[in-house]
Amino acid sequence: MKQQGIITLEQFIVDQQALYKDATGAFSRIFRAIELASKLVNRDVRKAGLADILGDFGSTNVQGEDQKKLDVIANDIFIQTLSRCGEVCAIISEEMDEAVFVEGAEHAPYIVSIDPLDGSSNIDVNASIGSIFSVYRRSDTSRKPDVADCLQAGKHQAAAGYVIYGSSTMLVYTTGSGVNGFTLDDGIQEFCLSHPDMRIPEDGKIFSVNEGNFQAFPEGVQQYVNWCKEKDAETKRPYGARYIGSLIADIHRNLIKGGIYLYPPTAKDPNGKLRLMYECNTMAFIVEQAGGVASTGHERVMEVLPQELHQRVPLFIGSRNMVSQAVEMYQSALRSEAHPG
Ligand code: AHM
Ligand code: MG
């Protein structure tokens, strides 16, 4: 009888690498760094209520948002572990204005973008938060890296993943051949394969959007949200509204159950709120690899060529049919506005 047993993240990555004859082990070293960082952040998140690490740090990040202590701690942990792994020449972080170029690793082959602790407004209220990461290859390792090397479209991601610190801690990632999820076994402190080959249902019954901003949404998004709430037996509407306000938690749930997550443009913020390089692209790669769709409302998220590190884009992401319909309604309203009558 074939014994499956527990498959740890480390074993899984080694097995995957064995499938590629040119694999150098660089990837495993990056993943080991990310895994270690996640476990360290997890430890701090789990004791957040006990230790003196809640609340504001007293500084603001590049987007003018208050930084929480845990944001700062998580950022330091990821920067340190990634810098030390020897395979990463540059790191982009939500918490840092400029890219970090790793000393002594000028010729290392990878660039990593991170949101070390996303959904930080949820820290103080014990709701799910997470870490997000994307890994990019450098085209030319013969020279020192610069910002232009970092500004790659999402379609060039070599890997993307997130860690959700929820009722359990999970790491979910893709390298472009499907999506796999690993749950942290607290006893042995190992991420163990728990959700192999994750697939997002083509349809769902959940919509996730901050409806407090409804009046500021474009006409077509308002129409879609209203449509989700209409009663219709055939399409099993109204859909359920679920919004944690933590991107990873909202998308993780929709990935498993089917659903759509929207962060649309508004008149005040025409590019929405979420950042391309370490929120939208990462989640887009994962959701696409699971069979879903991620759009800015105009194009595939992963086609957007970033102009700056902290660029924002609107996000329509989730189950294929739901996103297609939301984008279609958004586009159709834009066409009507452009050509009234
Ligand atoms: P953050 O990176 O500052 O935590 O902001 C990102 C978060 C996402 O996790 C979440 O989906 C979104 O902001 C919620 O925004 P809002 O409170 O405007 O609905
Ligand atoms: Mg964030």
Image: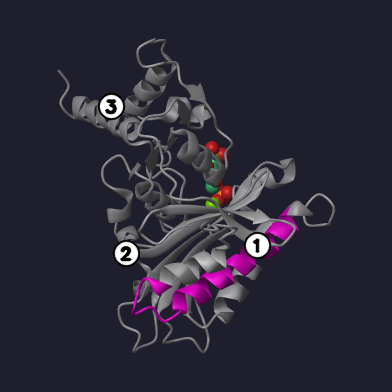
Position in image of residue 223 (x %, y %): 35, 21
Disc 3 is placed on an element classified as helix
Position in image of residue 12 (x %, y %): 50, 64
Report the span colored magenta.
18-45
* Sequence-first tag of 2 and 3: 2
In three-dimensional space, the C-alpha distance between marks 3 and 1, rounded to whole angstroms, equals: 44 Å
Q: Quadrant of the C terminus?
A: top left
Amino acid at the residue labelled 1: Glu
Q: Name the quadrant containing residue 266.
A: top left
Q: Counting other residues with Cα less than 10 Å from the Cα at mark 2, is it few (<14), some (14-19), or many (20 or more)?
A: some
Q: Which residue is mark 1?
A: 190
Horizontal relation, residue 153 to residue 173: left or right? left
- The front one of 286 and 101 is 286
Any mark on residue 329, and which? 3
Residue 38, magenta (yes or no)? yes
In terms of image quarters, where does ligand 1 lie? top right
Label 1 C-beta lies within 8 Å of the nearest ligand 2 atom:
no
